[in-house]
Each structure stands twice: as structure tokens, then as C-alpha cells.
Amino acid sequence: MDEQAFLLWSVPQSDEVKFEDLSTHIHPADRDRVRAAFTATRGIVGSYEIDFRIMIGDEIRWISARGLGNDSGLYNRLTYGVFLDVTGRKQAEEGHELLAGEMSHRVKNLLAIAAGLTQLSSRSSTTAKEMATELTGRLTALGRAHDMVRPLPGHQGQAAQLGDLLAVLLSPYENFGAFSGRIRVAVPRMGVGETAATTLALVIHELATNSLKYGALSAEEGTLDVSGGLDEEDVKIVWAERGGPA
């Protein structure tokens, strides 16, 4: 091996290096696979390539070993190959796989929610137009909640402010006639996680829609107050409608 290879493997320089000298650094999960590949190189005609991990102290590096197998790689009774440090590429690939997995998980969740809302809307509607209106309203509420969710500092996940979330979800119901000022929100300043925000958006949408159809918001003088407070580890939200039908 040349000087760079000794540095890469973090082994002392010597005139002769055996597989066992290197295998102590190979990651235990890859060791048997690499040993089998190393043994098989003499039987491979043409080029070979294998990627594996090595451990240098607490650091894990990815190595790509490439060369010519069988006797095609012999020159003056020596066979030649290269060790490439591909740690950066592997880390990028792992990052892409993690992102793709997260995106797949989110898409599946959204599709499951959409399917559930479609079934819910079909059961509570009598016409296709009514179903389309209800389904669109529910999906729009989810979209508003999703827009409110922001990353937290220090990679602590994502959350929305409870008060902001409620205000945004209820804002469309302020636009009906003389409703302005009839909806009041006063809740503790706190974050709501992404999953809880999705659930809360659907609950608030259903309550507000019912209020508009049958409750306080269906009457000219009706008011809606949404308040809340902390009760030990729980957050209690009070939905109070006044001035509507009995």
C-alpha cells in the first residue's frame, strides 16, 4: 500500500500488509461480506468493486475497493487496485434516502387522511355538490394548519402557535356577513406539534361549520368565544357559543 492507503486505514506502515491487518478495522456488520469478496477476487475475471465501512476510533468511513480480478490484474506478479474514501457520497445517499422515506411517509399519511375525509363526507352528504363542498372545506382546513407549522430551533421538530392556529382556522368564518368581531380567541401561548395540528384543524373545522349551520354563527347576534388554560399537563380548550338557537 502507498502512504495514502496507510493513512486511510490508520495502520502502521510496513512492507507487507495482510487482509487480517485491515479486517480489524472493517465494520463488524460488513466483515464477513468483505472477506468473502476478497477471497473471490482471484476467481473474478475483469473488474470488481465493493463498498464497505471501516472504523477508525469512533469515526466510521466508507471505502470503495476497486481492482481487476483473476490474472487480468497481474503485473510483475502483483495485482493492483485502489481504495477510495467515499464517505461523503455515502452520507449524501443516506441523507437522500432519509428524505425520500420521510416524504413517502408524509404522502401516505396525507392520502390516508384524504381517503378518510372522503368517506366521512360521503356519509354526511346527500348530493355530489354538497359532498364536494364539505370535502373541499376539510382539506382547506388541513392546508391552513400545515401552513402554520414551522421548524423549532435546535432541531426539536415542528410546531405551530396554538393561538395563531385557531385564529387562522376560524378566519374564514369571520367573512360571512356581519361576523367580524363576533369570534374571539384567547388561549395560552404554546406550540402544537404537526400531528396534533392536523387533528385540531379537523376538529375546529367541524365545530365552526356546525356553528355556522346550526349554532351561534347562524344567528345575527351570536358570538363564539374560544378560550383555554393549562391544567397540570393538559391543555383545556373551551368552545362557548352564545346568542344562537337553543
Image (cartoon, helix red, strand yellow):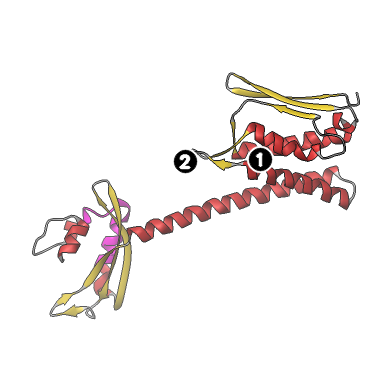
Residue at point 73%, 35% (across, down): 203
Asked if the stretch drawn in magenta spans residue 158, the answer is no
Residue at point 61%, 39% (across, down): 195
Circle 1 — which element? helix
Residue that carries the numbered disc 1 in the rendered image:
198
Q: Is residue 62 above or below residue 212?
A: below
Asked if the stretch drawn in magenta spans residue 33, the answer is yes
Marks 2 and 1, how far apart at CA = 20 Å
Circle 2 — which element? loop
Q: Position of residue 103 (x, y in %)?
A: 56, 53
Q: Amino acid at mark 1?
A: Thr
Q: Is residue 17 above or below residue 154?
A: below
Residue that carries the numbered disc 2 in the rendered image:
155
Residue at point 69%, 46% (across, down): 143
- In the image as oriented, which residue stretches furthest toward the top? 232
Looking at the rendering, in which quadrant would you find the C terminus? top right
Which of pointers 2 and 1 lies earlier in the amino acid sequence? Answer: 2
Local crowd at mark 2 within 10 Å, few (<14), some, or many (≥20)?
few
The residue nearer to you, when weighing 163 against 180, is: 180
Main SS, magenta residues: helix
The residue nearer to you, when weighing 67 against 236, is: 236
Query: Is 33 positioned to the left or the right of 124 in the image?
Result: left
Residue at point 82%, 40% (across, down): 175
Residue 201: which quarter of the image? top right
The residue nearer to you, when weighing 157 against 69, is: 157
Q: Over which residues does the magenta segment extend?
A: 23-39
Residue 189: which quarter of the image? top right
Query: Is 115 positioned to the left or the right of 64 in the image?
Result: right
Callout in the foreground (2, 1):
2
Q: Amino acid at mark 2?
A: His
Local crowd at mark 1 within 10 Å, few (<14), some, or many (≥20)?
some
